[in-house]
Image (spheres, rainbow, N blue to C red):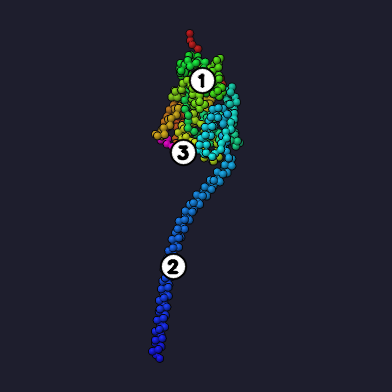
Amino acid sequence: TAGAGVFALWYLYREQRERDTEAIHSVAKKAEKLAQEVARLKKEIDHIKKMDSKTEDEQAQLKQFSENLSKLSSDNSRKIVRIGTRDSKLAMWQALHVEKLLNQLYPHLETKIIGMKTLGDKDLKSSLSSFSNKGVFTKELDAALICNEVDIAVHSMKDLPTVLENDLKICSVLTRGNTQDAFVLSAKHKRKYTRLEDLPENSTIGTSALRRRAMLAHHFQNFNIIDVRGNLQTRFRKLDAPSGPYDGLILARTGLERLELSHRITQVLDEKKLGYAVSQGALAVVCRGGDAWVMDLCEKMNDVSTYLEVTAERALLRTLEGGCKVPIAVETKYDLASGELRLKGWVTSLDGKKIAIADKISSDVKPNIDKSVRLASELGENVADMLKQRGAEEILIECRGEIGEHMGHVAPKKQN
């Protein structure tokens, strides 16, 4: 009986051990599977984290794109960029040029040109220097911008005041055309003369700019220099009239070229000798200061070299408190490779007998636009101060007093 009890205990113990062993193996297998599952899940979690990170970036980009698209769609509710301009042939060429550039940059952009007359276009009898207000060719376009009748206005930059009002901004300065002046001979002379210097004494030269009159009076004392107004076609009619007073005109070369009138140029004048007007040959696009969409559109048309040159010139003009009312000439050259910006300025009395000249170079004017604009402005201000030290201020005071009384240079009579 005792033996049977021991056997029974042994048998029960063996059965229990076998069950425990099976249980241990089962737990081990489950643990192995669980470990494999954990590893798989961990791998998936890592993958999901990476995808989530990528998705966050994509979502951020998508959000930014959506915001830009929404803004663009909102701005595009206008459906069109309205380009304001004077309605003369030359001004229309300039507006069409800007329209062409915009269409090249943005093929799906719609544009519309809106022409108008300014005070300077309506009054063709008064000399430009006799107008009491600045912006004689720009005020009506400024008003159209302010009243949201146009989105941009295209100007010959030499017509722009050095300080824009009513939160208007220059959003683009286009690549500059030729800056020189050109001598155009009257058709009645039938190409008898090929140079300005060849004209006989007491010849009559027409120009609308005080600067040209003063510089011509300085270099050609024996010419009569009188005012001429109107667009190019009007001036040519006056020039070529058989009984007209003019033997020749002095005009901007680039304006003649833009209207395909280069064949009328008798002589291109030396800019190193006579200079040219501040911003001559450059076109400016003006918009409302708060119109970020238009400013972004037009920024791509901006030419850095031209922008820096005219910045220096306009700073000089602003410091001298000049405009079309005073005879100020400049010559500017910017070398992109070396970063050198050179500015030369002239201030000449109306009779040509007094002249102040100053010249300076600014180095390291690289296309880092903010720093370069500051250096260009400082250069203009410095050259203006040099001119003042050399008598420019006295000349300008005399000029402002003489305007309206002495509107041209008369050749001195010969002494017997």
Q: Which of marks 3 and 1 is nearer the N terminus?
A: 1
Please tell me whether residue 386 is drawn above or below residue 351 in the rendered image.
Answer: below
Q: Which of marks 3 and 2 is nearer the N terminus?
A: 2
**Mark-to-mark CA distance, 3 and 2:** 64 Å
Residue 386, by quadrant, is top left
Q: Which residue is under mark 1? A: 249
Please tell me whether residue 157 is drawn above or below residue 402 in the rendered image.
Answer: below
Residue at image coords 43%, 27%? 359
- Which secondary structure, mark 2? helix
Residue at image coords 54%, 18%? 240
Foreground label between 3 and 1: 1
Task: Tell me where the magenta segment starts and ends, as one range.
Answer: 362-368
- Which secondary structure, mark 3? helix
Count neighbours of disc 1 (C-alpha within 10 A) and say few if under 14, some if 14 to 19, many if 20 or more. many
**Mark-to-mark CA distance, 3 and 1:** 40 Å
Which part of the image, by quadrant, shows the N terminus? Answer: bottom left
Q: Earlier in the sequence, mark 2 or mark 1?
A: 2
Labels 3 and 2 touching (C-beta < 8 A): no
Q: Which residue is under mark 3? A: 370
Count neighbours of disc 3 (C-alpha within 10 A) and say few if under 14, some if 14 to 19, many if 20 or more. few
Q: Which mark is residue 34?
A: 2
Residue 162 in view, yes or no: no
Asked whether 363 falls inside the magenta stretch, the response is yes
